[in-house]
Image (cartoon, rainbow, N blue to C red):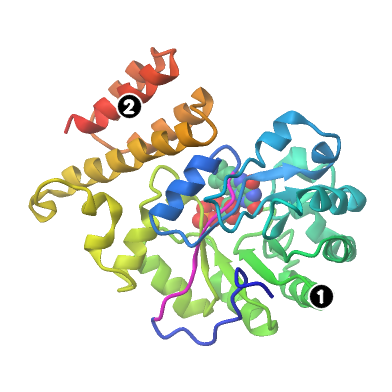
Amino acid sequence: MTSFILPKFGEWQGEQRPLFLAPMSGVTDLPFRLLAKECGADFTITEFTNSTALTRDAAMSWRKMETCDDELPFIPQIFGGVTEDMAKAAGLLEDSADIIDLNFGCPAPKVTKICAGAALMGEPQNLVSMCEEVVNRVKIPVTAKMRLGTGPDSFNAKEICQDLEQVGVQRLCVHGRTLKQRYSGVADWEYISQVVDSVEVPVIANGDVVDSSSATACLEKTHASGLMIGRGAIGRPSVFGEIKVGLGWMAEDELPWIKSFEGNWNSLDDVEKQFATRRWCWNRYIELARQTTGLNIKSMRGHAVSFTKGLPNAKHIRSIMHGKTSREEFAAATSEYLESY
Ligand SMILES: Cc1cc2nc3c(=O)[nH]c(=O)nc-3n(C[C@H](O)[C@H](O)[C@H](O)COP(=O)(O)O)c2cc1C
């Protein structure tokens, strides 16, 4: 095992466990992943990428696999329904990646119709042999992310995880919903705790962790070896540091947006703190984008909507942002709004 795969932790007694930024298509681009790390995430994963497209050298798919020296570990996530393409794509990524993550959680019809993503949980033997093939093809660790199963009467993540451990998958992540549920209902942390208890490799719990109290509740219930946060981090990468502060894992004045704040942070009201936090995050996102991928208008639009969501006058600023066609103007208009309060 490399140092990027920590051993399985035992019962949780309040001590620090790693926080993962969940892979999210259209969200977790390279500058956002770097930002999440600066905000306190311990691990980040790329959005999922079609393995067959990678083997065919599709430029769009390879762009999603972009990384830089500062991203350590680099964990690309791939999906697909063809075992040979998954193994081949993993081989192509091996030189740049530290870990390869395999997606068995995506419920989107365009993915499940090629029997990839969460649909493979309905064909557990194929899923396991696909993982075995990938593990045998590369020298770096292979990890897998999945759901509980395909539907309410077919939870099989426990059995699948036991088999994956046997074929050499080194870390597992379980999102506590079924394929059928997509994002509805509540994540079943109780079933995740059964998965945690049934294997020796570390299991990361995922689903509905959005702040320090849900992080505490999830760790108390699952004793998982880490937590993965998705929607709670969209527009709010600061959630990682906030959780660490809330759980006593780091001091509040170590948070980068507080460290760099000129003035008395404690004299700010809640809305002022929100603006100051998001302003730091947005400006840093833009800096990191300039240093890595360059400013991308589509990514910026998505993040700007998320970074301003719920703030006063956010609707008004959105119409101003939509009028900006140049990337620099767009970045500046969003910064100006976040500086306005
Ligand atoms: C916009 C969006 C895109 C997602 N894309 C991916 C993906 O590319 N790969 C993946 O494994 N899961 C993906 N997911 C699922 C998340 O990684 C995570 O499992 C799910 O959101 C549950 O966690 P949460 O309750 O913390 O959001 C995506 C979720 C969202 C909301």
Q: Give the residue at the far right of this rendering.
A: 84
The residue labelled by disc 2 is: 334
* Residue toward you, 192 or 229: 229
Task: Check if residue 18 falls in the magenta segment.
Answer: yes
Q: Nearer the viewer, residue 325 or 123?
A: 325
**Residue 298 spot, x, y in % from top left:** 52, 25
Q: Earlier in the sequence, mark 1 or mark 2?
A: 1
In the rendered image, the vertical position of residue 41 relative to residue 331, given as above or below? below
Q: Which residues are magenta?
A: 15-24
Q: Are marks 1 and 2 in contact (CB under 8 Å)?
A: no
Question: For the residue carrying disc 1, how many other residues have a C-alpha within 10 Å: few (<14), some (14-19), or many (20+)?
Answer: many
Q: Which residue, given by chain and number where applicable, does mark 1 sit on?
A: 163
| Camera sees residue 184 | no
The residue located at (71%, 43%) in the rendering is: 49
Out of 137 and 315, give the one closest to the viewer.
137
- Along the horizontal axis of the image, is 319 left or right of 59? left
Q: Nearer the viewer, mark 1 or mark 2?
A: 2
Q: Quadrant of residue 335?
A: top left
Q: Secondary structure at mark 2?
A: helix
At label 1, the amino acid type is Asp
Q: Position of residue 72 (x, y in %)?
A: 56, 57
Q: Residue at x 54, y 71 (%)?
A: 189
Rendered-image quadrant of the C terminus: top left
Asked if residue 57 lies left or right of residue 298, the reply is: right
What is the x, y in percent for residue 227?
51, 67
- In three-dimensional space, the C-alpha distance between marks 1 and 2, rounded to whole angstroms, equals 48 Å
**Is 73 part of what is drawn in magenta?**
no
Indicate whether 16 appears above or below 188. Answer: below
From the viewer's perspective, is residue 20 above or below residue 159?
above
Q: Amino acid at mark 2?
A: Thr
